[in-house]
Amino acid sequence: MSQLSHQDERVKEFLAESHENLCACDIDLLALETDPTDRNRIASVFRALHTLKGTCGFFDFKKLEVLAHAGESVLSKARTGDLAVTAEVAATLLELVDAIRRTLAHIEKDGSEGDEEEPYLLERLRCFHEKKPVEPAPARAPGPPSTRSLAETLLLGSNERTVRVDVSLLDRLMNLVGELVLTRNQLLENVAEVDDRTLTMSSQRLNLVTSELQEWVMRTRLQRIGSIISKFPRIVRDLATGAGKRVRFEVDGAETELDRSILETIKDPLLHLLRNAVDHGLEPPDVRVKAGKPPEGRILLRAYHDSGQVNIEFEDDGSGINVDAVLVKAVAIGIVPRDRAATMSQQEIINLIFLPGFSTAERVTSISGRGVGADVVRNNVERIGGSVELVNRPGHGVTFKIRIPLTLAIVPALIVTCRDKRYAIPQANLVELLRVTKEEASSRIEILHSWPVYRLRNRLLPILHLEKLLGLERPAKEPSQPENDGDLSIVVLQVGERQFGLTVDLVSDTQEIVVKPLNRGLECIPVYSGATILGDGGLALILDVDGIAERAGLKSAASQLAVRDSLDAGRLQRATSQVMLLLVEVVGQAPMALSLSRAIRLIELERGSIVRAGPELFAHIGTRVLPLLELGALLGSPSRLDFLQTKVPEDGGGLHIVVCTTPGDRCFGLVVDRIVDVIEIPLELEGCGRRLGVRGTITIDGLITQILDVDEVLELAEAKLRGDRSAVEVSNVGR
Amino acid sequence: MSDGKQVCSFVAGGQLFGVEVEKVQEIIRCYQVSSVPLAPPSVAGLINLRGEIVVALDLARRLELEATSPRTKSPFHVVLRTADGPASLLVDEIHGVVDTTSLAFEPPPETVRGNPRRFIRGAFQLADRLLLALDIEEVARASDIKAWIGEQPK
């Protein structure tokens, strides 16, 4: 049913477009009668007929196709200069245009092309084409088919219900509505302060009308999603043939409309999902039959509006995602640590495929799996404030559910202040707002190397300072602004899988802002995505959260976060991504390094604050007691802490402690002699040097460096402790 | 040289400049300029020109002129009509409209050297000083700003 109405819709479009093109042909042909050498006009008529012919093939309008083809052949000769467009040729072509019009009229009436043949017209066109003498046209036999007067035929196309409008006109309209929205906002702000009933009422009316106008103007910019997926059936066919599969592609809701700019953004993600479905989702016919499914696979794209958003569902009836296989692979490539694998939920595992780099391995075929993974789909969708969800039905297929906003031109945003300037942050990127008191800040914000991180619900949140990022650092002597009393406002933002905190001076409110692009080259500053005019007429730059993460170098750092656990997952011979390593020095040992992700804090302690309780060492940190492990002693160097009890060390200096977490989230400190550096390198372990506590070695700056396995160091320490205890027990027995 | 006869003249960095009056959309004063962090120094900021966001360029800095006197507290904005839409020039003083019909038009004087030379199309001889004719398309060109941003360390 809906299939049929789509067809009707398309035929209508075709008719409207063809009438328009034919009108242009009339004008061109008339002009050619006076100037037969005008190449542009010849080309223009040629193109119009060519387009018509192409579309006819699509609808299977055979007669129209023959007519258009005949005209096209003559014009192609004329185009090369092979045939002069004499008045006779031009007149015949005009006749052709009329014949096409008559056929179109027939189609409009009952959907068929009619049985009126045009043998003489076609014969004459053929003669022009073959440069044969042309027989004079016989007088048209008067009869019912041709009783329509020319004028009547010409006017046929004019009862259209659509108007073609230049896109720039629509953009201008949208801009003006944006202005109106701003003015409305300003007015409402002012009216709120005035006690005037009539004014309040009329301003409320204005408010309503503006909102409605905004919505309708926005709708004029909408395009049917069908306009981008019309090419998909062909792509599916080619892909399926290449993969030796049989696929049926269905669309439900092709008439669902979306803003032009958004349509452009989701085109590639959809194409990617399509490739993925044909290549990996659907099984070959024989496998399908064995599984009791029809040999032909089915891909369904469903689009619909729901609560102010557009939903696009992409469904296949293939084998679904093998959750176990995903998990095995995730562990193998080091995205998931072994110990965590057992506790992950099905959905958590499925979501792994959205991680960068997941799809790159193994499944490379000629069609997909070339490194453009599901993460790209998610990134593209999230960039425009949408979301992707994956529903897996093992054995029965996969559904990707994409939700996207209707428009990008007017978005809700959070207004923040930094150094007396206001900035807008699109709400789509906003996760939460934190206010950290001065006291809390000093204890919960730690510096890992030069990177401040905030411990938020047991996660490390990298912190960026907006003023530093914008190069607006306060001179040290200048007092901080009175309104923030030393407290920090942190805006937690999300781009793709990454979250980070952005400190600002003040968080104001949220507003609907009209996004205006920057120009004159300022659009090249990556941290801004545009500017907007606020309710009071002031300007605010719109922050580009993605650009900020990039500029701060967070992107590369954060992609390591995704892989960071791989370091501790063990068995990893090669990780293609970069990792961050903390380099430490222990006297008597080759340089050592451990994954920065396991180090939560670096502290320096006075030797006096270290307490020995039997074989165990502790340090008092504030009110907490931190167990200490002496790294050197564990790995076979003589203990340097033994002299705690005997004599004061010559250097007298403090001890460096790397505070690490156990898998059970408890903390312990590794005692080292010196913290050397934090570096970022691709971790490619050399096989040698493997022993308990050391996963292998790599060469850093020409030095063989041992990579510690923190968990094994912990095991080693526990074993040693047990050994000490049993030694004590043995000696006790001996007495 | 088919220069407009009427030239709007103004002072920036101690020099007298002129732009054909038909290229000047309007002149406004005391407008609040919203600075753009990370933008080149020649960009004074953005202004809200009746709902349109317009980039304001600091003319003296754009032409690499030595600031001879401290910037006036409330500079003028000369809003220009350029091929890419309006752009504003921040200047110190407005000198009124000069009729250049009977004035001699000469190539840029030798004193204008180096990079800024491309912004000057030529000079009109006034009785007591030179009026430098600005090439506004060159002054408002986006590529310079782009290049500057591209050169900044990340």
Image (cartoon, coloured by chain):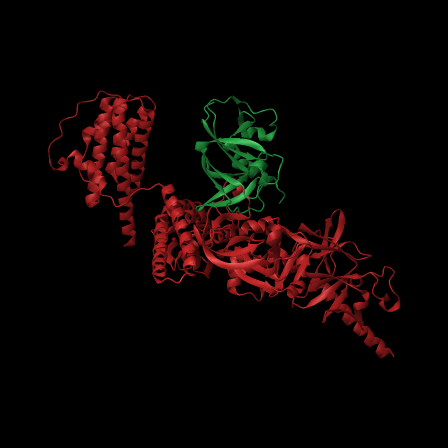
Chain colours: A red, B green
Q: Is residue A213 visible?
A: yes
Q: Is residue B126 left or right of residue A403?
A: right
Name the image quarter holding residue A18. top left
Q: Please provide percent x and percent y for residue A369.
A: 51, 49
Viewer-proximal residue, A225 or B54? B54
Q: Tell me if residue A72 comes above or below residue A547 in the rendering.
A: above
Q: Quadrant of the C terminus of chain A?
A: bottom right
Q: Please provide percent x and percent y for residue A655.
A: 79, 62
Which residue occupies 52% across, 32% down? Answer: B138
The mark total stands at 0
Viewer-proximal residue, A289 or A399? A399
Q: Is residue B81 left or right of residue A134?
A: right
Q: Is residue A241 left or right of residue A88?
A: right
Viewer-proximal residue, A52 or A221? A221
Q: Tell me if residue A168 comes above or below residue A45 in the rendering.
A: below
Q: Please provide percent x and percent y for residue A674.
A: 78, 57
Name the image quarter holding residue A630. bottom right
Q: Quadrant of the N terminus of chain A?
A: bottom left
Q: Is residue A553 visible?
A: no
Q: Please provide percent x and percent y for residue A673.
A: 79, 58
Q: Tell me if residue A706 comes above or below residue A173 in the rendering.
A: below
